[in-house]
Amino acid sequence: MEADSNGENGIKMRISRRSRRRSKQKERDEVGELLKKSWYHLRLSVRHPSRVPTWDAIVLTAASPEQARLYDWQLNRAKRMGRISPSTLTLSVPDPHGHRIGSGAATLNAIHALAAHYNDEVATTENNNSSGYSMQHQNSNNDVPLTPMVSFMAKKHILLLHAGGDSKRVPWANPMGKVFLPLPYLAADDPDGPVPLLFDHILAIASCARQAFKNEGGLFIMTGDVLPCFDASTMVLPEDTSCIITVPITLDIASNHGVIVASQSGITTKNFSVSLVDNLLQKPSVDELVENKAILDDGRSLLDTGIIAVRGQAWVELVKLSCSCRPMILELLKSRKEASTDIRIVLSFTCVCNGYMSLYEDLVAAWVPAKHEWLQKRPLDDLSFLHFGTSSEVLDHLSGVGSGLVGRRHLCSIPATTVSDIAASAVVLSSKIAPGVSVGEDSLIYDSSISNGIQIGSQSIVVGINVPGDKGGLVEDSFRFMLPDRHCLWEVPLVGCTDRVIVYCGLHDNPKNSLSRNGTFCGKPWKKVLLDLGIQESDLWSSTVFQDRCLWNAKIFPVLPYFEMLTMATWLMGLSDQKTNYLLPLWKNASRFSLEELHRSIDFTRMCIGSSNHQADLAAGIAKACIHYGMLGRNLSQLCEEILQMEVSGVEICKDFLDLCPKLQEQNSKILPRSRAYQVQVDLLRACSDEATAKHLLESPANTSTPAFQKNKFDNCVGQFFHPRMVKVELPVRVDFVGGWSDTPPWSLERAGCVLNMAISLDGSLPIGTIIQTKETAGVLINDDAGNQLHVEDLTSIASPFDSNDPFRLVKSALLVTGIIHDNILVSMGLHIRTWANVPRGSGLGTSSILAAAVVKGLLQITDGDESNENVARLVLVLEQLMGAGGGWQDQIGGLYPGIKYTASFPGIPLQLQVIPLLASPQLILELQQRLLVVFTGQVRLANQVLLKVVTRYLQRDNLLISSIKRLTELAKIGREALMNCDIDELGEIMLEAWRLHQELDPFCSNEFVDRLFSFADPYCSGYKLVGAGGGGFALILAKDADCAKELRQSLEADSSFDVKIYDWNVFLE
């Protein structure tokens, strides 16, 4: 069964003909936005899987046991880096006996291996009863017991990634596995994190696909050399069957690729259709397309994407089949047949779709990655595919996208431009480049150390090369090496050998093309190569081997001392301009390997250790420079994680950095924030496994939070004459559209902040207020709306720090920051202070800060102090520091200033604020009040719990957090423009992005109830978010129009499963 992605005939993807003609730049922008959304979803599923379900298991197929061990290392690294949830099982499954069995049989083999892995858990669950649940050994022909295993597996959500194979057309990716090649999209979002890999981006897209399965178990299959860029969360999968995801393509593309022929009948809705697969055509002509009825009404055909989903009863039957398929696979291996060609004999299984579904021969053959060489990056509606089938395609995907998407420098050491020549368009990742090196345009350098005297041409690829800086007397100091334009160069460590082989070829060489089919080496026809170098065919290919003679099996790469191999490479590439008579016999007498032999001889363990040590050394160099020369702007906690992967000296390096901390603080005491300096010490102590000292440092008095404005004096901010009187201050609450967190210390003290918020009344009244009266008796009497009362006779007893459970600490703090106690104002008289806040506790409406603003303003009024909004807002910041709440400035600004306003803060002490009121038209106010629902979720939240986590991440210089808050400030500016232009729909989009960013900052700012509420409201909405820091409290839901707002309100109030209250509100404009 296939699910097609074209509007009425597609998987819930609304597509117009105009979108098919969108520009390349727009397509690139859309890819970037889609990947950002997918990565956000991936991180959320890893950090909070109870809210955003993740895969129960991620399984990779591999070509050999050695490659499977490499994949296991990569999977473990992905877990360590937060790409995969700790709760997810990861497994690499090699083809049996290292023989290629095709993706069809590899799928069955992988499910069988996963079931074997789960065997002990199933046995424990079933209490080891007499039926016996032990899975048979891989080499056994006995079937896996079905009943308990199938019941167990049926509930699991499995991601299967076909990643086996020998990457013949991307030979430099052979050592790492093509699925793990570097793809630095969005790398700038996390400059201290690991280089993003193709695998990481596939995980991000697949994390959204997990949503489509909901709570029903199933299998999702993808290929490891394609990045499908589409919003997988919008898929609507048919129940109890398997389906292949398709996308419409034009006939010129269809004639070179695979085409799905869908049945004319099927399940059709407004947003998608599901049809049975009638046929699969490979590279069909137009006549064949017409004959097989493969042309759609709009003149296009359906592309086979290789993305397959199996769920429900179909998944159950596939598990049964997999658990009993072992004998068939072994029999196929004995007969030396490619399994996918005969797999149809076992791939027919019962579905609840009236009969049988057959994953017949051709459809299964389409799973094989080799069949997908045609998948190119094209504007295929809302499905864009990046195929990594050739080296040139890899460079195309790095040079052919917007500069904002590709990180061209990441975790690397590069010399000054005056001593090197590195093109701006070159991509340098996890590499160390010495002075005197040249790198041409659009080249890729990855996981390498390049010493001086090396020149790399344009559009070239260099991977895993480690050119020694000290030549050890092997060659002259003037040694130079040039890699020509459009060439690839890499190293391979060999099993049982201390040497590494240097390998090279042309960018466009196809190692599969034989001499008779225009095969090339380093861009030249083989006949010219042999003639120029004086090499015979018999030197490269054995006469006993009955294979096509091609680069893949040519024994051309010699094992020699390092610089001799480079010299030999220059000769073999046809670049030698000196006497080379000695090179031909040296080459003939050397031990030589072909690409095919190298593929079987890679020392994966040594390669992994070497890569880890190399990246740890780079991280150590970056951290050292940050400490010695910088202001600790890098994420040392993240860099230390990489340093600790170093085999021997990782901890010692971190200890050396720790010893530098006292000197660093002494040198930069006037500039470096103390909080940041302490956090660096804590991070380094934890890296050295000294948790006790780190905890002691965090709790030490020197590191306790002190008022941000501790040097301000309040002697002159209070009137010196006291007059008996009464004042009443009533204030609105605030709702924030976007920009929150940028107002919070320490961010606001070090960086600019921007917030867009609005003052509102609830149910026709201002909900927050205070009445302050003078009284003849001394002391202060305090009453609140909860019935609490306190009389303080000795005012000197009011001092910080306050007990966090003290219900009167807000008023006590207000008495301190206004200077009333400090200036002995109440020597002969007293005060009676009453407060109220007619909003639910933990509302997120800024209640605490606004109430503090009301009390401070009332105290300043009654004492003839400076009651200006600017002064009150500044004092409330100090008050919150005294209380230990640590809040920002947006709440008090939101309540003190009427209407909608855009507020910017400028870092420093004292903090400078610029409040810019939005001159809103009556039409804008009316439309907002008609479309915006202010909903109390009933979920109590405490902002300080979220605040602590976010502040700690900021002090660690977590780059994802910093980039998220920067984006929130940008959105505040965009939101102001949108409202000024009365574009409320754009405001809704801004609210949605702001809500995603808030969850990026802390995934616990939402919960399952809030997720369910927003999911229920989504069809009616342009945007939604929780106000404030999130975690519960109030929600803003912006409906598409007034009618949608009314309908949504009625639906929520009628649905007993949502115990929410929807408030009437008005913009407070006075």
Image (tube, helix red, strand yellow):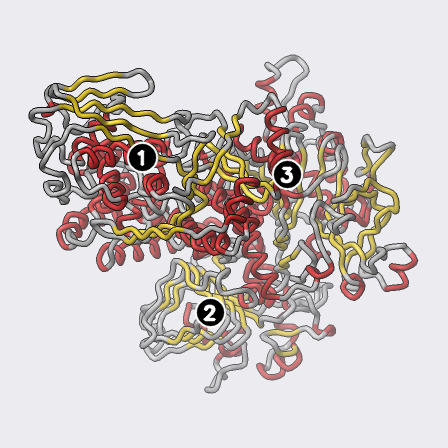
**Which residue: 43% across, 57% down?**
188
Q: CA distance from mark 1 to mark 3?
A: 33 Å
Q: Quadrant of the N terminus?
A: top right
In the displayed structure image, the side of residue 722 where residue 84 appears, left or right: right
Of helix, strand and loop, which one carries label 3?
helix
Residue 564 falls in image quadrant: bottom left
Q: CA distance from mark 1 to mark 2?
A: 51 Å
Of helix, strand and loop, which one carries label 2?
loop
Q: Give the mark nearer the N terminus: 1 vs 2.
A: 2
Q: Quadrant of the C terminus?
A: top left
In the displayed structure image, the side of residue 949 where residue 106 appears, left or right: right
Of 446 and 756, nearer the camera is 756
Q: Is residue 19 visible?
A: yes
Residue 1021 falls in image quadrant: top right
Label drawn at residue 426: 2
Label drawn at residue 849: 1
Q: Residues within 10 Å of mark 1 (few under 14, many from 20)?
A: many
Of helix, strand and loop, which one carries label 1?
helix
Residue at label 3? 1044
What is the three-letter code of the residue carrying label 1? Answer: Ser
Of 77 and 856, nearer the camera is 856
19 relative to 1026, above or below: below
942 relative to 554, above or below: above
**Which residue: 46% across, 32% down?**
1034
What is the three-letter code of the residue carrying label 3? Answer: Cys
Q: Give the mark nearer the N terminus: 3 vs 2.
A: 2
Of 150 and 685, nearer the camera is 685
Q: Residues within 10 Å of mark 3 (few under 14, many from 20)?
A: some
| Contact, mark 1 vs mark 2 (Cβ under 8 Å) | no
